[in-house]
Image (cartoon, helix red, strand yellow):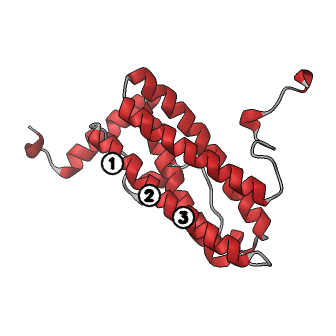
Amino acid sequence: MVQDKTPQKRLQEEQEHKEHVHHTKINAAAIADHILGNIHTLHVKLHQYHWYVKGPHFFILHDKLEELHNTNEAWFDKIAERLIASGHKPASTTAEFEKYSMLSEDPADKYLKAEEMVENVIGDFRSTRGLTVRAIRLAQEEGDDAFEDTLIAFKDQLDESIWMLQAYLGKEALEDDDDFEEDDDEE
């Protein structure tokens, strides 16, 4: 019975289950731990960039980075709660988020030029989008329509943010995007 187990024993069983899934047949919930880890890292990076951005476009970027931070936070909660509603146990501690994040952060980034900060955010969004696409496909295979829908909406938000940040840099939405490279032979 669940009530007879200590919190430590329950956590140990959960972690053993997650390790088993990660090393056998990965599922959408396992990929979602990586997405949540990325979102957690983005929480810190977007805040750092929001605080330290400088230059002639300070007011625009300061506000945009705050908007991206707030949107990021909303998705953090929405994805985790969707997982819990489906019976999963998503990562929920800083240690877990650091373990699962595919992104990095650097205290020296506060000294980057504004355009470099934007390029880093685009790269992080693209990395997170790649994980999200993988999780969408797995959720579809697993028949988890609600989680699939949540992830599709999250991907849509990432795509829109990437497009807008690319436009800020004077680039096309898919320019420099390894996931969407055009075949030179087709041109």
Element at label 1: helix
Q: Which mark is residue 69?
A: 3
Instruction: Name the residue at 50% across, 37% down.
Output: 152
Mark yes or no: residue 10 visible. Answer: yes
Element at label 3: helix
**Rendering quarter of residue 59:** bottom right
Q: Which mark is residue 81?
A: 1
Please name the amino acid that badge 1 sits on.
Glu
**Image quadrant occupied by the N terminus:** top left
**Image quadrant occupied by the C terminus:** top right
Asked whether, in this view, residue 128 is left or right of residue 14, the answer is right
Q: Which mark is residue 99?
A: none
Rendered view: 170 above or below 100? below
Is disc 2 surrounded by few (<14), some (14 to 19) or many (20+) residues within 10 Å? few
Please name the amino acid that badge 2 sits on.
Ala
Q: x, y (%) of residue 76?
A: 44, 54
Is disc 3 surrounded by few (<14), some (14 to 19) or many (20+) residues within 10 Å? many
Which mark sits nearer the N-terminus, 2 or 1? 2
Is disc 1 surrounded by few (<14), some (14 to 19) or many (20+) residues within 10 Å? some
Rendered view: 149 above or below 46? above
**Residue corresponding to mark 2:** 74
